[in-house]
Amino acid sequence: MSHHLTAVQKAWLSTELEQRERHLRGQLEAHLHGQSRVDRAHEVLHQDEDDAAQRRPERAVAAALTDREQAELEAVTQAIERLRSDRYGVCRTCGVDIPFDRLKVQPWATQCVPCAS
Ligand SMILES: [Zn+2]
């Protein structure tokens, strides 16, 4: 349980996190759809060729982006849950209050600066 954040600070962080969540969901969807569009285009263009080698790099890029976004989305979703259940803003390693200045930059942070570095 953490009480070092004011109601105004928590409201601000909550808005930040929700905006980030929406943004990431949108990006994730765009990449997932973009990937299937690229595959379909290649199938039409190279129906009689073995284009597996050509397709792989694009697919890897899309998959890497998606993985990163998914991991970030998970971190953001968990931060929103912590904020709602009042377990937010405490370092999971040493238990100190994470300063608002750090949360402002990275609202989904789960560790204080010394523990994270
Ligand atoms: Zn710590």
Image (cartoon, rainbow, N blue to C red):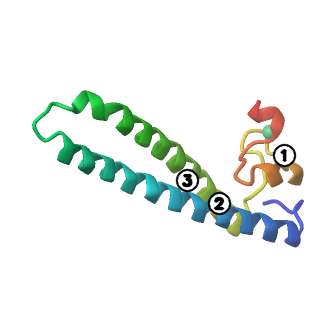
Tag shown at residue 74: 3
Precedes in sequence: disc 3 or disc 2 = 2
Precedes in sequence: disc 1 or disc 2 = 2
- Which quadrant would residue 11 be assigned to in this image? bottom right
Residue wearing tag 2: 20
Label 1 crowd bin: few (<14), some (14–19), many (20+), radius 10 Å: few
The quarter of the picture where the C terminus appears is top right
Above or below — where is 64 with respect to 53? below
Label 2 residue near ligand 1, CB within 8 Å = no
Give the amino acid at mark 2.
Arg
Please state if 96 lies on the left or on the right of 38 as rendered: right
Q: Secondary structure at mark 3?
A: helix
Q: Position of residue 44 (x, y in %)?
A: 18, 48
Q: From the viewer's perspective, is the residue at label 3 or at label 2 nearer?
A: 2
Give the amino acid at mark 3.
Glu
Tag shown at residue 96: 1
Q: Position of residue 50 (x, y in %)?
A: 15, 30
Alpha carbons under labels 3 and 2: distance apart: 11 Å
- Which quadrant would residue 100 be assigned to in this image? bottom right
